[in-house]
Amino acid sequence: MAPDAVFAQDDAQMLGIETRARVQIGGQRPAIIVRPRAGVKRLGVLLKAADTGKTIRLKAGKIRLGSSKELTWSQAVGTQKWTASFDVQYQGGKKHQFSITLETTVFPKIASKLTKADVNLEERFLEMTLNQPAGKVDVQVIGDYGKVIFKDTQVFAGEKPGTPLRVDWEQPKGVGVLKIDLRAWSEFGFWVGTEVTPFEVQIPHEEVVFEFGKWSITASEAPKLDKTMTLLSDKVRRFGGLVKLQLYVAGYTDTVGSRGSNRELSEKRARSIATYFRHKGLKIPVFYQGFGEDALAIQTPDETKESRNRRAVYVLSASAPAMQKSIPRASWKRL
């Protein structure tokens, strides 16, 4: 083919122009990539933003036949349309000028949002969100005996950032969920890994009876906590090698007395119970919190004696219990 005929071909095709049009913060930058079909002596590109008129100049020196060159630039998060004006001189001396239009988008670094409260263990699904259009989610569910019980890839259709993405799973009868591992992909191939550990078990126990207005554990009540300690130790031995367990002790009162004093009293009692377990050799992190009469088990009028409201809850979990009716605050204190 004669040289003039070669250079008469489409200019963009002659330069082998490609674009890296979708990137994320912290990764690669937007780029014009050239893979010329003839040696290039020099290349200049003037980018002009369609909305603001802002210009960016890009340039390259010699580009050999068979090689490639990336011309990159910085861009803020968002989508920008450009007019790209090319000024190229080939090795043989031929010069060409032409323009193309292109569009580039910079996304925030991909991130997901998923908490224990977003996991429905009874109905076996969770809802998470991404800050980029959704592509797919790889999900792996670990059973409470430490083995994978479910593995799947669930495909989405580019749902907008922030849209709840429902991920379902199946599990054998009688097997609980220890943790769920996920890898969420945007439709542009970026991914983020996340893990949620919904494992949580309330430890059954006999309630400790405290003297009126007191929080010290009497010798007569200690055997109740010793029995509970045995249950705790068994659970820690079973699950402690699979997840990092923590104990949460919540205290409650009835409605006799002021709300503020009841909250303080219940917290002191919860701390006493937590301290007892620690002194008995419980090695895992222990947290406590008092809710007083703010989360009654049995609704009663004010100044009502009700033994069922003078209680404590012991939760063995990999993370803080989700806020709910019985746990209206998340102000846990570490022992």
Image (spheres, rainbow, N blue to C red):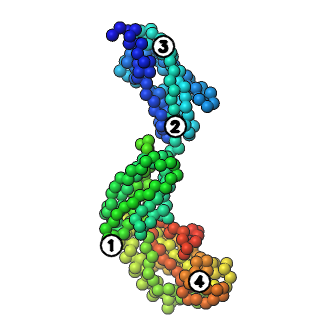
Q: Earlier in the sequence, mark 2 or mark 1?
A: 2
Residue name at image x 40 percent, y 80 percent? 230
Asked whether residue 283 is in view, the answer is: no
Asked whether residue 201 is in view, the answer is: yes
- Tell me the tag on residue 174: 1
Image quadrant containing the N terminus: top left
Name which quarter of the figure residue 202 lies in: bottom left
Residue 298: image location, x then y, percent: 56, 84
- Tell me the tag on residue 299: 4
Farthest residue to the bottom: give it. 220
- The residue indicated by pointer 2 is 105
Q: Earlier in the sequence, mark 3 or mark 2?
A: 3
Distance between the alpha carbons at the discs numbered 4 and 1: 34 Å
Q: Are marks 3 and 2 in contact (CB under 8 Å)?
A: no
Q: Are marks 4 and 1 in contact (CB under 8 Å)?
A: no
Determine whether the residue tagged by mark 4 lies in a helix, strand or loop.
loop
Which residue occupies the foreground of this view, 276 or 180? 180
Q: Are marks 1 and 3 in contact (CB under 8 Å)?
A: no
Mark 3 is on which residue type?
His
Residue name at image x 39 percent, y 60 percent? 168
Determine whether the residue tagged by mark 1 lies in a helix, strand or loop.
loop
Q: Earlier in the sequence, mark 1 or mark 3?
A: 3
Q: Name the side, left or right, on which 6 lies relative to 327.
A: left
Q: Name the side, left or right, on which 242 lies relative to 46.
A: left
